[in-house]
Image (tube, rainbow, N blue to C red):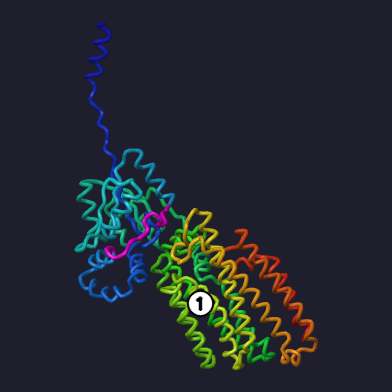
Amino acid sequence: MSDFRMEFEEEAALPAVKTAKPIPLFIDLDGTLVKSDLLIESLLALLRQAPWCLFLVPFWLMSGVARLKAEVAKRVVLAIERLPLQEDFVAFLRETAGDGRAIYLATASTRLLAERVAEEIGLFSGVLASDAKTNLKGIRKLKAIQEMSAGPFDYAGNSRSDVSIWAHARHGVVVNPAPGVYAAARRHCQVDALFEDRPSAFQSWMRALRVYQWMKNFLLGVPVLTAHAFTVKNAGAVAAAFLAFGMIASSSYIINDMIDLSADRFHPRKRKRPFAAGDISLLAGLVGMIVPLATGLWLATLLPHPFRLSIFAYLLLTMSYSFFLKTVVLLDVILLGALYTVRIIAGAAAIGVEISFWLLAFSMFVFFSIALVKRSSELLTMEKMSETAAVGRDYRLSDYNTLNAMGIASGYLSVLVLALFINNPMVMENYTHPNRLWLLCPLMLYWISRLWIKTSRGEMHDDPLLFSLKDRVSWLVLFAMMMTTLVAI
């Protein structure tokens, strides 16, 4: 008993060990936790949902950026649960929170959005955010952090505006930094971790520009073949037209992807597109689309006036599709098919030849069929995801059989037009062995039928062009059709 009392008294005499309170961690939202910019996303959503409100933007901005953010956030609803997170960084935060450390969200985004993000992730002890009067960025954010922490703090960010906060932080964490930011952070504080999950900028921009889609521009050369107008001058004109359309198309793809962010993030493949995935910043996208657009328009000035009208028509159609018509059932696929046909018309305009009725009729039916392949494959993808309708499109799963029937019928009509064209007396005059052209019909019939069987089986990519480029059978059919045409000349 005495030994126990002595041991107890000795332990009681030891000084109490004070457990140090963990240093709080404050993290930025835009570009750090979320691989996007919520203000630009909100403005793009406003442009899509209520474009007339954009006339109010200058008046809101006159009262400051904070007022702009608050007004835009009240008018749009972002799919917070679909925002692209920096997953490795989020895993780090969950581990840190599990150790009992307080984590705060400190962002220049408006409080309405910041609190929704904090609630979705469920890790934060509190939220510091902008309100209608104060834009919480730079020095303002630093002061708010110092008031809440009342002592040392750590900070995680990604941009140059975060450098002034790292200068007063104990330690720092850098996430997907802008060029030069990581080095600047290390000069001002001890950087504990760097999180970087973005692919190379070149790879991301090639995907955003969708250079493989330039294959469609070979349609510009079709009038040269059908009109038998093989000259060096015409070849140069078609080459310039090819580049012009490629640049304009790439610019329009960037615009379309930024406008369609929310819908793309609900799609299993489209959510990996550079802007939807946050691999390229939206601000860089807004600036980056100007270069190909300006280049394409400049190249168009080197070609005849009818070609310039064609390329402006193409640009107008693509913009109409991106902002309005993609949500209108059937009108969207008619427009998609028309964008192929516009290339053929532009190719004829570039070399100054008339386009035949047969070629226009054939292109109308075959490209409408291909556009319906795209929509049908998207519906089957939605079915696999247990969705009842395509997000951002006016189609339901129950429409699949109807779209399938229309697409097959349109494809077969294109083969019929081809057969009638081959039997035309004009063809008899232009080809030495016109009867050999009849082989084109079964080849075309086989390719269209196979395309729709692949679609019905769920084996079709949502981009039929990309499928065809990777499909060996499609290349063999194309080669056979080219050889058939050559032996008929």
The residue most toward the top is 1
Quadrant in which the C terminus is drawn: bottom right
- Identified at 28% across, 51% down, the residue is 169
Residue 75 magenta? yes
- Identified at 41% across, 65% down, the residue is 281
Q: Position of residue 62 (x, y in %)?
A: 21, 73
Image quadrant assignment for residue 461: bottom right
Q: Position of residue 168 (x, y in %)?
A: 26, 53
Can see residue 288?
no
Q: Position of residue 334 (x, y in %)?
A: 52, 76
The stretch of residues the image draws in magenta is: 73-86
Residue 380 magenta? no
Determine whether the residue tagged by mark 1 lies in a helix, strand or loop: helix
Q: Position of residue 447 (x, y in %)?
A: 68, 70
Image quadrant assignment for residue 324: bottom left
So how many labels did they put on this image? 1
Q: Nearer the viewer, residue 188 or 316?
A: 316
Q: Which amino acid does the dot numbered 1 rest on? A: Leu
Binning the other alpha carbons within 10 Å of mark 1 as few (below 14), some (14 to 19) or many (20 upward) gives many
Relative side of 15 to 187, left or right: left
Which residue is identified by label 1? Answer: 335
- Identified at 53% across, 90% down, the residue is 302
Q: Nearer the viewer, residue 174 or 261?
A: 261
Relative side of 304 to 93, left or right: right
Image quadrant assignment for residue 50: bottom left
